Image: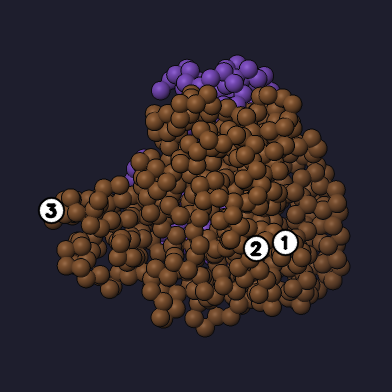
Amino acid sequence: MTKDAIVGRYPRSPEVLLSLLHDLQKANRENYLTPEDLARAASHVGLTPTEVRDAVTFYSMFSLRPRGRHIVRVCESPNCHLAGAWSALAELRRALGVDVGETTADGLFTLELTSCLGACAVAPVMMVDDEVVGNLTPERVRETLDRYREAK
Amino acid sequence: MNLARAHVLVGVDDEARLAGADKVLAAFREAIAASNLASEVQVVETGSLGVSGHGVVVAVQPDGVYYAHVTPDDVGAIVEEHLLKGRPVQRLLLPTAAPVARPADVLTRQKRVVLKNCGVIDPERIEEYIATGGYEALGQAVTEMTPEAVIEAVKRSGLRGRGGAGFPTGIKWSAVRTASDPERYVVCNADEGEPGTFKDRLILEGDPHRLLEAMAIAGYAVGAHVGIVYIRGEYQLSIARTERAIRDAEALGILGDRVFDTDFSFRVEVRPGAGAYVCGEETALLESLEGKRGWPRIKPPYPVTCGLWAKPTVVNNVETLANVPDILRLGPGWYRTLGTPTCPGTKVYTILGNVRYPGLVEVEMGTPLRVLVHELGGGLLPGRTLKGVLIGGAAGAFLPPAELDVRLDFDSLAERAAALGSGAVLVMDESACMVDMLSSVLRFFRHESCGQCVPCRSGTDVLVRLISSLQTGTGDRYTLDRMVQIVDAMRAASLCPLGQSVALPVRSALAAFRDEFASHVDGRLCPQCQTTARAHGLSA
């Protein structure tokens, strides 16, 4: 879908800003919002580009910098912490060769931390894009990454 | 619903999906068709069956048999043995909490009002909700009751907000009803972000029409024609099911123009969040809905007079609203038979951590914490002892085992300087270090502080530094006092409940586990804290 088509599905109201930004971000292979996206969203919903930028920088699901094809978000909230999220995080750091906030050299993954994902019964948990992956062990982390690598 | 001999209920939520629920569902449909059982046995894709941590859970009704960790390979055995021959497959049965208890006891010992349909009906079929009495209350309200009578019924029920604060719902509605501005809104707060909480997600995934019915009732009562469900951006399945439910209800004339052929019109929209815990605070949520940063507003004015677009607005939590249809259908008198005199009704809890059966339960208000931990949660793992419970999420309180008889309702917990909050119950055994657990809570607050007001912006950062010093052996005995000074200042001076509530976990942890904190000062090191410190790149 073209950017114009995405924008055209929404009414011209600031109320739809976050929905619209989610869609624009998803349409970019590098999972971020470009300056053009911000300008396009701003003019559609009737805000200034600065107002849109102000909003975008507040929310953790949006990025203004290019990211990997897939976003890996590891929960570090108390329940996952109790269940050993740190070992999953250590494995992700090792397997991806990047630190939190960084993108792998092949552009495939960006590693991020997140607050509770609401899937606590299968802690520790991470999300890869829209998929929730729970009961994390180092093996499960590696398997999941492999699955996304193969699916590229 | 079809008149089938048996129903196979496959609980599909985010957790079950990652365990392969979709494949299990497909395997059941295929196997049942292949065995020529399609006219007798109906396969139902439903929300969570209320048991978590057991992979794909499948229930066979009316037999009341629950299977756990079901894979596509097990489906043949269940169809062959149970559905054809009437012999439940023993090796797949859901384990029981007590040796004598039957598997379904985890469910039957609960009092389910809000979760009544979750795991029972197909949430994607409006007919099934209607068949359970769904939308009756809305029909009754708009055709037989005045808006004032609806508000009166909610007031008399004693329903209090389940988002954490416990404010009386009827009084909120009444304030919006009597506001001078005729343009009003109903907003449902589904920005569930309190760590350890996923009750709203399971209500939205398992019974979305209940929420829509309640929102329409609220709209009728307060005179609003637009309802908005603000769902956190990570809850993809909740968003999809709620959107679908709206379309289906509109197609039947239950929502949209002329609800039940009356002059009342009400449409509902879904708006996703984008990853900000503070947007669960009602005024931050309203700012976010207006396309801005989710910065809490200074109160007063309150949303009931100055809410979305400065119009009078009802903001209610998912669980609060989910009580409303039955309050109208069965009456406020019935509702008051549940719970305590000052906190009627039920409460949904997520029991998590080092218990045998983590998951979602619904019990009457006033139920002792002990029942949740030792009965519904199945107690601790064999050989382990209880160290403490974090109740209410990150913005909650650490309770020692001696407090296990506390009754869970707004007032009993407030007496003990704790809060019911979102209903998260995180159980910790002796292997947990409380300094380490509090460090996780404090890092959460630092990450989620919105940065608008100084006490919270700086306070959350200083608190993480102080607790990190305990974890890396550089703290001293003054560190603990400084933490208390800071949270007290934050409680007094922060703009919104986020900053104010950090005092709760810090003060309760220091009060209940003082010795453990004291053992982390003056260069003494704890292995668990060292591991955490290393994971966060701190030198230990």
The answer to whether residue B363 shows anywhere in this view is yes
Instruction: Judge depth for marks 2 and 1 and give the one in front.
Output: 2
Residue under label 3: B36
Disc 3/disc 2 C-alpha distance (Å): 51 Å
Q: Colour of chain A?
A: purple
Q: Amino acid at mark 2?
A: Thr
Q: Which residue is mark 2?
A: B340
Helix, strand or loop at mark 1: helix
Q: Chain of mark 1?
A: B
**Mark 2 — on which chain does it sit?**
B
Name the amino acid type tagged 3.
Asn
**Chain letter, colour brown in render:** B
Q: How far apart are labels 2 and 1 at the CA level?
A: 10 Å
Look at the numbered disc 3 and give the secondary structure of its residue: loop
Q: Which residue is mark 1?
A: B411
Label 1 near label 2: C-beta < 8 Å? yes
Question: How many numbered marks does the figure carry?
Answer: 3
Residue drawn at 51 percent across, 70 percent down:
B377
- Picture coordinates of residue B143, whole percent (x, y): 51, 33
Q: Quadrant of the C terminus of chain A?
A: top left
User: Percent from the top left, x then y, of residue B178?
Assistant: 72, 32
Q: Position of residue B483 (x, y in %)?
A: 82, 61
